[in-house]
Image (cartoon, grey):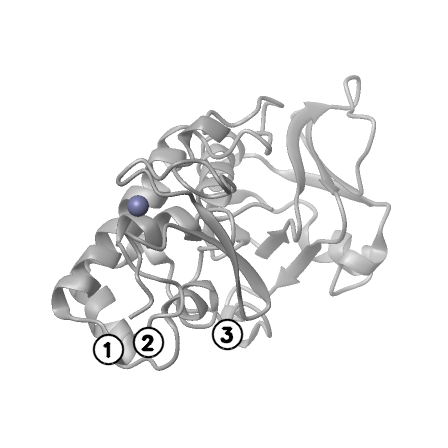
């Protein structure tokens, strides 16, 4: 599933490649991914010019002269910059540009392509609920945000309405680097532990971002991300020795999700 390193990488690539392109038409093979009809999407955004591409949480947001084009890959998918002569085998929606290039979008399971008026983002039912992008926060911002929160630290990190961008792939290493058990209560975290968590988030996400995201996602040019399985420190490494203390990594249930932890380095209390 794409998380912040992958989504940010796609938005950076799209901003670089698509800015200045004029949308000619949309071909929609999966109308249920839209929040308008295919005819409306064409009516609203054909002839618009892409001015920039950013992201908020898992939403990639193209700002055009006639409105926002919002893309969410859901459980995963590809966004490929191609042309009509070299189309991928699978796609659910194609955006044709006037320069003959096109964007072929595929969802592995289910995703969204939404239109939003230029002044309408604050009313978008899913985007309006998102917390701030996690890597946009300074340590001071992060400290102020978490101090007002309740509950367990892992649930907080994964709750996109409080903090946008962290998912199940990266959260294990973030908590390990911060030496925090996933079930630790936020209310009991010391100032030093909050600082360690902020650093863990940076060290858990930025190396993958620098490599264009994880190997299981493709970039705009059809190449796999450079963040490999061996770059993951303890996530998905059940029974292998902890790189800090040598104790076996454990897979435990934490609420509805599983967590990979070192119970020596990340004591529960
Ligand atoms: Zn350990």
- Please say whether residue 100 is visible from this viewpoint: no
* Crowdedness near tag 1: few (<14), some (14–19) or many (≥20) residues, C-alpha within 10 Å: few
Q: Earlier in the sequence, mark 3 or mark 2?
A: 3
Q: Are marks 2 and 1 in contact (CB under 8 Å)?
A: yes
Disc number for residue 188 = 1
Q: Are marks 3 and 2 in contact (CB under 8 Å)?
A: no
* Crowdedness near tag 3: few (<14), some (14–19) or many (≥20) residues, C-alpha within 10 Å: some
Q: What's the residue at 46%, 43% (across, down)?
A: 235
Q: Which quarter is ligand 1 in? A: top left
Q: Closer to the camera, 243 or 142?
A: 243
Q: Closer to the camera, 232 or 46?
A: 232
**Which quarter of the picture shows residue 179?**
bottom left
Give the residue pinned by disc 3: 129
* Left or right position of 78 against 234: right
The location of residue 250, given as percent across then percent down, is 47, 50
The location of residue 95, given as percent across then percent down, is 71, 39
């Amino acid at each position: 599933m794409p998380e912040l390193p992958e989504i940010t990488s796609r938005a950076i690539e799209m901003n670089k490649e698509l800015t200045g392109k004029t949308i000619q038409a949309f071909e929609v093979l999966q109308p249920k991914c839209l929040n308008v009809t295919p005819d409306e999407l064409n009516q609203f955004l054909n002839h618009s010019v892409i001015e920039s591409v950013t992201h908020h949480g898992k939403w990639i947001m193209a700002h055009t002269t006639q409105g926002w084009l919002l893309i969410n890959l859901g459980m995963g998918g590809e966004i490929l910059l191609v042309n009509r002569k070299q189309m991928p085998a699978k796609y659910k929606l194609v955006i044709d540009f006037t320069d003959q290039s096109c964007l072929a979008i595929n969802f592995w399971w289910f995703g969204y392509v939404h239109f939003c008026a230029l002044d309408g983002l604050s009313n978008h039912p899913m985007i309006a609920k998102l917390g701030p992008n996690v890597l946009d926060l300074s340590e001071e911002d992060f400290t102020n945000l978490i101090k007002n929160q309740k509950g367990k630290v892992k649930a907080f990190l994964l709750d996109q309405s409080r903090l946008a961008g962290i998912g199940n792939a990266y959260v294990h290493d973030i908590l390990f680097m911060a030496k925090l058990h996933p079930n630790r209560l936020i209310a009991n975290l010391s100032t030093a532990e909050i600082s360690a968590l902020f650093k863990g988030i940076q060290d858990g996400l930025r190396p993958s971002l620098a490599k264009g995201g994880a190997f299981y996602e493709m970039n705009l040019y059809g190449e796999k991300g450079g963040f490999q399985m061996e770059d993951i420190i303890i996530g998905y490494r059940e029974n292998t020795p902890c790189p800090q203390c040598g104790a076996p990594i454990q897979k435990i249930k934490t609420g509805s999700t599983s967590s990979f932890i070192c119970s020596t380095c990340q004591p529960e209390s």
